[in-house]
Image (cartoon, coloured by chain):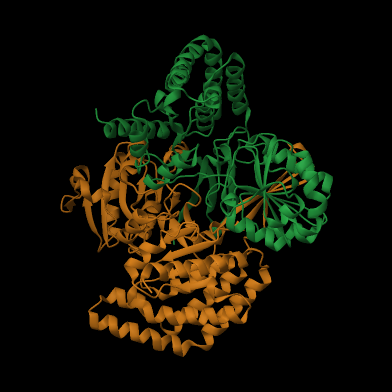
Chain colours: A green, B orange
Amino acid sequence: MDIGAYIEGIAKKAKEASVGLRGVIPEVKNNALEAISNSLRKEKKKIKEANIIDYEKGKKKGLGEAFLDRLLLTDERIENMINSVIEIRALEDPVGKVIAVRRPQGFILEKVRVPIGVVAVIYESRPNVTVDAASLCLKSSNACILRGGSESLESNKMLVQIIQDALDQSGLGKGSVQYVERAAHEGVKHLVKQEGLVDLVIPRGGESLTRIVTEEAMVPVIKHYKGVCHLFVDADADLNMAVRVVQNAKVQRPGTCNALETLLVHSDIKAKLLPMIREALEGVELRGCSETKEILPDIEKASEDDYYKEYLELILAIKVVASVDEAISHIEQYGSSHTDGIISGNIHNIQKFTDTVDSAVVTVNASTRLSDGGVFGLGAEIGISTDKLHARGPMGIGELVTYKWIVRGDGHIR
Amino acid sequence: MDIGAYIEGIAKKAKEASVGLRGVIPEVKNNALEAISNSLRKEKKKIKEANIIDYEKGKKKGLGEAFLDRLLLTDERIENMINSVIEIRALEDPVGKVIAVRRPQGFILEKVRVPIGVVAVIYESRPNVTVDAASLCLKSSNACILRGGSESLESNKMLVQIIQDALDQSGLGKGSVQYVERAAHEGVKHLVKQEGLVDLVIPRGGESLTRIVTEEAMVPVIKHYKGVCHLFVDADADLNMAVRVVQNAKVQRPGTCNALETLLVHSDIKAKLLPMIREALEGVELRGCSETKEILPDIEKASEDDYYKEYLELILAIKVVASVDEAISHIEQYGSSHTDGIISGNIHNIQKFTDTVDSAVVTVNASTRLSDGGVFGLGAEIGISTDKLHARGPMGIGELVTYKWIVRGDGHIR
């Protein structure tokens, strides 16, 4: 079978499964999620055996430490995966909620939450995403088509097989959760063209993967390319708070998309704040504008390019600005609309900042690292969006549903 | 200037205007809308003069009666346009509404309605859309780029000039409402590729225009291709109600996308209902399946193709089905996910139908013609969506906004 026909076959099965999921009651979905978490626990050994094959292959291929670490499934990590399923099961069901009722012209008009349909999730070699994405889609009554990085193929095949067996036992078809086993690149290209079968594609991973998906896609994509997150420390900020927040945003987990990349400092406080920052961020490479270098002469000069960069490591770009307006303009030009914040005691500047900065998440006197589905209380994340439509910022099961209108009349005509 | 640079220039101006519109208060927008309605009334003569140029050109070109009629602006129609602006002005402001507040981990998390940014609307030669779209976008704090059919160029240029002058007087820039005057086809192709400048494209018009926009677009598009709307008359329907509703859905305005195209009839009532339908729908050409033809032998046979068709005229396809399930399957296969309804007294079948039919609007004992932003009480429509994401069915100003998250902390870190 050629790859096009293979993908179309998967998409058709998913579509069929999604029709079956439309009317399904919460109890059936919750039973299936329980069966999944039970099976994952029972089959821990099999999962680790499959995973070790991927791991050894990766090692031979010379994959980096960090990559191999993300790939590896330990007992503890499998336990975390299972807990994630249990947590998702416990979330409020997002489907069927009536979000508006009106009676225009006598008939009853309801706006009701319904699943999106078929959701394709494309991600890197992190097997935990397989379980998370399948559970989130199931909880929101969506069929899903999954494709992780090639280096995690054996692990993912095993996880999906366990999930499918549990679905089968629960009376939901195996078509509800499917995995694309063949030809990663070609497969994805076909997958994102399945208009009428696939309703949404969520690429999770590097910018290049996301660009390919977006360029090839004939179906809607929700995505973020990167997170060039800013914090602006205003003239009358509490400087100790500023240092604590900047330190957390940059250092706590620098490899994540909500980590800080550029610090904007009001010129009135540069002489006081910048030395404090240098001290608190020991081990972080600082790159500054010329005004920054007047205070911290021994740091690197930041190039124009630096301000566009998502370092994802212990490097921080710094720029001195004359006002909140200049900070906002900088973010407008160099930012990625992911997460940007202000640290200030000035209520006027805070309001201007939150009104004008057009990012998915805007923080006030808080770390950019808080921009997260788990922290926000949405449950696990299916992705993060810097798009403008449908979903912005962290996406949980509430973002995996859409709505339809129901008109209930008694012979009403126009 | 080449067309690419021309369009990019417009898009950049729109983006700039959209930044200015972010923090604008409702009063300023309402004043601008008032200035627009006043100017339109004052400049009625100029509008009609520009329109008559389009109309005469169109006549010479041999455009059809219906086309010329939609193009023509009479005093009454200009008055309707003005009233539409006044009504949009009176709607509740959709921007700035806090739609969720939570306190996870002590900080305050707000989900706030914000404008989308820059919205491009591409439509046919109907000058009233120019005023409607500009007003809806302004009310929702979006900058807009408009392009109507070439045959309405002079009318639209005049209308946009009047709108821009009113914006100027109200302190909002002319960049908030712009019109693409040059090279329709090439212009549109460039317009839908302005990633980072244009946030949303709404094509309104025929299926071919919509297909071109969707295929070329690099930015999100919300659209509907067509409306192949169904009514299913169930075995225990009130037959008189059924006839009244079917008649209204098919005949009241057959050229609209929410008009009825295919009637599904439960076999138990075919012998009684079908002759009633023929009588009530005098002047409508009926095309039926073989079972239909057993009752109404002198009508045309419906081909497989007929069931996919959006006739937009006085033709109705009919099919006899054995059950609500067969009706649902037919709609799933042949429908366009626009508006589909059931006429029934059986509460179980109604629930199955509303749960399973995956259309933007599902009607129960009511005409498909009710599927309309005005009827639903949304105010004027910017478009209708059969897409799954962001907006489904009629779209008003509530669908021209998105949201952002605001995290208000007091030094909160992760």
Q: Residue at x 41, y 87 (%)?
A: B48
- Examine the rendered structure and indicate whether residue A162 appears above or below residue A306: above
Res A121 seen here: yes
Q: Of residues A383 and B95, which is closer to you in this image?
A: A383
Q: Nearer the viewer, residue A55 or B80?
A: A55
Query: Residue A354 at x, y = what percent?
Result: 70, 56
Nearest to the observer: residue A23 or residue A212: A212
B62 over A305 or under it: above or below = below
**Which residue occupies 71% across, 35% down?**
A283
Q: Residue B267 vs residue B153: left or right?
A: left
Quarter of the image with the C terminus of chain B is: top right
Horizontal and vertical percent position of residue B244: 38, 57
Residue at the image point whose x is 58% and y is 22% from the top: A81
Looking at the image, residue B380 lies above or below residue B412: below
Quadrant (top left, top right, bottom left, bottom right) of the N terminus of chain B: bottom left
Res. A354 in view: no
Where in the figure is residue A376, as x and y percent of width and height? 67, 39
